[in-house]
Image (spheres, grey):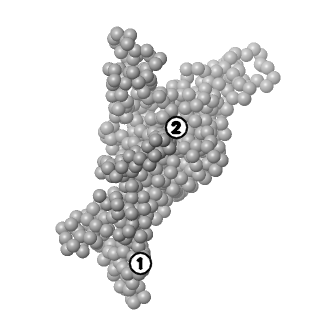
Amino acid sequence: MLYKDASSQSRDFIAAQGAPWQAIDGESVTRMRAQNRFQTGLDIARHTAAIMRADMAAYDADPAQYTQSLGCWHGFIAQQKMIAVKKHFGSVKGRYIYLSGWMIAALRSEFGPLPDQSMHEKTSVPALIEEIYTFLRQADARELGGLFRELDAARAAGDEVKAQQILHAIDAHESHVVPIIADIDAGFGNAEATYLLAKKMIEAGACALQIENQVSDEKQCGHQDGKVTVPHEDFLQKIRAIRYAFMELGVPDGIIVARTDSLGAGLTKQIAFTREPGDLGDQYNSFLDCEPVEGAGNPGDVLINRDGQLLRPKRLPSNLYQFRPGTGEDRCVLDCITSLQNGADLIWIETEKPHIEQIAGMVDRIRQVIPNAKLAYNNSPSFNWTLNFRQQVFDAWTAEGRDMTAYDRAKLMGAQYDETPLGVEADARIQSFQRDAAARAGIFHHLITLPTYHTAALSTDNLAAEYFGDAGMLGYVAGVQRKEIRQGIACVKHQNMSGSDIGDDHKEYFAGEAALKAAGKDNTMNQFAA
């Protein structure tokens, strides 16, 4: 409904209530409603699921229409990211937020910093989703509040043309509320536990849940050693549990991202149940590293029958079984096909390096079965991007027969290579990586899991070195505040960002001329008006 029509409707309703309601202003009610567009987390989940589905369809039609996100560990970080996106690009289209289990473990657990092993409180995941959306909704309220003030000023000045322009901007306002892809780890337990946590995350507003095929109680970070996967049927139970949660809560087009860690996982805790040769359990077991046995084997042996031969799967003292070396890619392909055939919408292949052809090689095989298979891909800070891409260029140029004597492949991280042809070429490939991978390797969504963890550490290190050193207060002024002012960073007016002006509006609604407002002439935030 248009702003002016909503205001008229509110005025008519208030007038019908008679004298007791005469102090209630219909236009103020309309403003408050516009500033609180989403009443519940489920409203957000339905809204953002529709956005993400439309973006997936756009990508199917044109791979240049890939999407991106940055991982955020606090609502304020997410809010500032989306405010920055609107400022720089005029729209939030195609830009999401990633909620990383790693960052929750490292930064949001009551136990203090934890490794990414599902030891943090699982309730902290939906709590962070709710927190992020609280901050994004406040960004909407703040931006609309500024438009309402401009409207009042235009009316007071008798500038009807300006007033109409602002009314159009209000009606066309684009929300900061964007999809969150939220990490549910390995489900924090069995399928029922996964279902219960998924419901909490969806109720908080998540439209997309990412689940991985590791054993829940042995879960490791995808870029660390010791990962243990589960048979496909165990994983599919959790995918189905998440779909049931979406359906129960009235978000049928919610998105499930099925992540496979099989590329770097050499272990399994279970031998899969098999009904007949060639079924999914048999395919999983076919990757086990086995040795032949004589007779009935040894006491305590677990034996399997493979092609009529009795074999002993190699079992470690931890009671885990190991896969044959070199089977990671085949297992990833089977994982992805199986997940997509059983309810997942997107796949995520966790790799050990950012190499387009490695990813594309697997995706080509997956698309032979699932032609529209799409990936979410972790552009991980765990990769040394500079070294990886310089080595890729080094290897490519060596294969072409170029003279590479000026370069030491083992030391390509060195700053002395920054301005060399190899360094420049590597940077160009890093710059185009997302675009190239979207076109070649089926990557619909590019995310960085932990960027704001690293930016917070880097900016704090720079400030501490200056402020506590010789620069003193100039370290803050030149390194932070002056840049905020000149770059138009919204939170330089931190009182406004924290909601002070929204509070003033409400005081005026509630108290009229008696309102004691904070934004008077003596508010020091006025120093930043220019």
Q: Residue 75, relative to residue 64: is it above or below?
A: below
Q: Position of residue 465 (x, y in %)?
A: 48, 40
Farthest residue in the right direction?
299
Indicate the secondary structure of the residue bearing disc 2: strand
Residue 153 visible somewhere in the drawing: yes
- In which quadrant of the rendered image does the N terminus lie? bottom left
Give the residue at x 24% y 70%: 154
Q: Find residue 473 and report its horizontal and vertical position in percent.
A: 44, 49
Image coordinates of residue 294 in percent, x first then y, are 75, 14
Location of residue 66 by image quarter: top left
The residue closer to the viewer here, 154 or 191, is: 154
Q: Which residue is mark 1?
A: 515
Mark closer to the chain start, 1 or 2: 2
Figure check: 411 above or below 262 = above
What number of labels is visible? 2
Does residue 477 lie above or below 519 as drawn?
above
Q: Kindly identify which residue carries mark 2.
A: 259
Is residue 488 depicted above or below 325 in this figure?
A: below
Of marks 1 and 2, the one in the foreground: 1
What numbered label is drawn on residue 210?
none
Q: Residue at x 35, y 10 (%)?
A: 403
Q: Amino acid at mark 1?
A: Ala
